[in-house]
Image (cartoon, grey):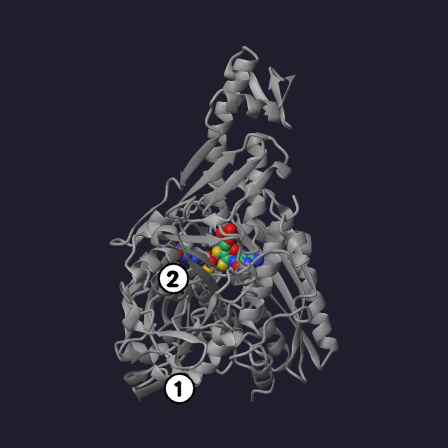
Amino acid sequence: MKNLDSKNHVTGKSVYVDDIPVQTGTLSGVILGSPVAHGKILELDISKAESVNGVVQVYTFNDIPGKNQIGGIIEDEPLFAENEVHFIGQPIALIVATSEKIARNALKFIKVEIEELEIITDPREAKEKGHLLIPPRTFKIGNVKNSWSKCDYIFEGKVESGGQEHLYIETQGSYAYPIDNGSIKIHSSTQGATLVQKIVARILDLPMHKIEVDVARIGGGFGGKEDQATPYACMAGLASYLLQKPVKLILHRLDDMLMTGKRHPYSSDFKIGLSKDYKILAYQTCLYQNGGAASDLSPAIMERTLFHSTGAYFIPNTEVTVYSCKTNLPPNTAFRGFGAPQGMFVIESAIAKAACELNISKRLIQERNFLNEGDEFQYGQIAENVNISECYKTSIDKYQIDKIEKEIKDFNSKNTNYKKGMAIMPVCFGISFTKTPMNQARALVHIYQDGSVGISTGGVEMGQGINTKLIQVASKVFSISPKRIKIESTNTTRVANTSPTAASSGADLNGNALRIACNGLLERLKETAAQMLSCKLSQITIKDEVVFKDEVDSKIHWEQLIETAFLDRICLTENGHYVTPVIHFDKTKEKGHPFAYHVYGTAIITVTVDCIRGIYEFNDVKIVHDFGNSMNTAIDNGQVEGGVAQGIGWATIEEVAFSKEGKLLSNSLSTYKVPDIYSVPKNIEITPLKTNGPELALLRSKAIGEPPFMYGIGAYFAITEAIRAFNPNYTLDYDAPLTPEKVLMRLYQK
Ligand code: MTE
Ligand code: LUZ
Ligand code: MOS
């Protein structure tokens, strides 16, 4: 089935928050952010701004009726700064005016005097000075200490990976207005409607039932709207509640880039030990996560780094520690991969270092250490249905790696100013929220009297195609045309207590809840049909909108069946509730079975580096990916292509830069470069691995949202191979993103 949104997206008809027709008298909000990264607020005077013509009100923390607290996992983040500021752009006040222009112009009339305090932007410095967001955590298996003496080779190194701007096309925003009975309705561009509802209720000191949150779709989230859509909904909600007027707050792109958190930069140390035959015997790593000024989702992201720190490999003796460091940057947050890419970059760097020192191909070490069936992860889960080696073998055969390697060698021997490089990136990614209780979902299904169907779930459509997949589920269970089915907006009054659409689990969780609801309805409809045909329920099937009795066409059509059921007073509404079975995790032991299943795959990335300029072009990305039994190959391939492009961007050209004063230097699209049509790989080939798919995936179709992102890591190592071919003096280092400037320096390193 085609993505049902594609036509409306392309023709501009899809409605986002800023497209919702507004009520007359709608006001606009603009945020005053802190001009300094750390300081004490000595004076805050809003009176002049409040007297500007058109300004209706200026709000600060003083105006919050409930708790000035938006922290999700840990309550350590105020909505508006009180006595201190901790990052540039931290909201201090909200100006509400009759137009956005008036509000923006009034910003300069707010007087803030701040005494500057020490600014820390480096996670290692933060750790040294004792500024941690939460205590460190360590995962281990085997005994690393005792293993070093058994290793024939030991290598150590340092790894840096940078941040990443989400750059969703729709910036953060919300539109709030009062409705009946002192309630507020909020349209928010969020991945987590319930989280918005809960925190707005906390800010306003209202019960959650007074806050209705509605999400039709969002123009991309990539994790950036899992938690960080909330403050903007809170601000619009606050103003709208206090003024009893509709209020809209849409971030300007520059404010969005400045104020919101990004992917966490990490700084890491590793030590890796191998046997003579290149088996990795021991691996120890310590990662310093740059959390920013508040914890946000950092504790959960730290956890996923710990889970994925050994990548697609089995290492019998492993010890990994992560420190979540508090710095004076905007609180960093969820971003596709959620800490896993950072951990995987370190293990790939360690393997690259070993290969370089041993003067062998990196893939020789990779292929000897792939995870196997029955291996134990450092978190206690036993690996099942492992097929990383199968993906790799398939890619060797299908893409002829030997030939690619030979062609690159030939090319490099014939060309002096251009060099090619290749890398293989294996991926193993666990599916489920690592916090077990979040793995639940509900769906509400109405069959209307005319046989059409309306579906509500907690799933948020953000371009990943969940709505199309949901229609496929209902269409399949009922055996009716997709045309009869509509996906309603995601709304907290229809489906409550939802997890954010995240962790690549949106389709699995909401789709399974929907499947359960539809099956419940189907049973009732079959009962009606059995009565109509005076037979047993077990004799009834519905195929292509027609009722069959004992496989024979009964001539009873779907519409007639629904009408009869309704007249029989059968309930044509059902609620489905799904919880992922099997999973559990014990934090006191750091062991358990946190994931429903894992997604596997390999990518071969080839690059050509222009050795005069330092620029590069990705020629091919050749992937073998384990989709399970993909329920929508167009959507899933799109997710792979998008993920790969975004991953390559993180590893190569996207450079988030802050000054030592905590000022965002890459603060616009002229200073922050994302992959475009010219810089994405010229050719992305995707081969699905032939498998049945796990039972815990929706219709055995594996989760797809995040895993392909990590194929992009291979881009880094492909480039370093090309640099090595040009400059034998280049000593391999690990400092992503590997921008053209950095490449140039390394090409001519002495
Ligand atoms: N694809 C598009 N087009 N837009 C997005 O914002 N987010 C990614 C991924 N693919 C995203 C996307 C992230 S971070 C996740 S977790 C998943 O989609 C979420 O959706 P799912 O759980 O339904 O796969
Ligand atoms: N969000 C979350 C996530 O809250 N928990 C997770 O485990 C997760 N994993 C990936 C992306 N977002
Ligand atoms: Mo995705 S980082 O789980 O929103």
- Left/right placement of residue 392 relative to residue 212 reads right
Q: For the N terminus, which image quadrant?
A: top right
- Image coordinates of residue 522 in percent, x first then y, are 51, 27
> Relative to residue 128, is residue 477 depicted above or below?
above
Residue 12 numbered tag: none
- Left/right placement of residue 404 relative to residue 268 reads right
- Left/right placement of residue 380 relative to residue 530 reads left
Give the amino acid at mark 1.
Glu
> Relative to residue 672, is residue 300 depicted above or below?
above
**Which residue, given by chain and number where applicable, does mark 1 sit on?**
661
Q: For the C terminus, which image quadrant?
A: bottom right
The answer to whether residue 9 is seen in the rendering is yes
Determine the image quadrant of residue 84. Answer: bottom left
SS for callout 1: loop
**Which residue, given by chain and number where applicable, does mark 2 sit on?**
244
SS for callout 2: loop
Q: Check the image and name the residue furthest to the top.
A: 534
Front residue of 405/453: it is: 453
Determine the image quadrant of residue 414. Answer: bottom right
Q: Mark 1 or 2, which is nearer the eye? A: 2
Q: Check the image and name the residue furthest to the right.
A: 414
Front residue of 369/559: it is: 559
Give the spatial CA distance, label 1 vs label 2: 40 Å
> Relative to residue 119, is residue 344 depicted above or below?
above
Front residue of 188/314: it is: 188
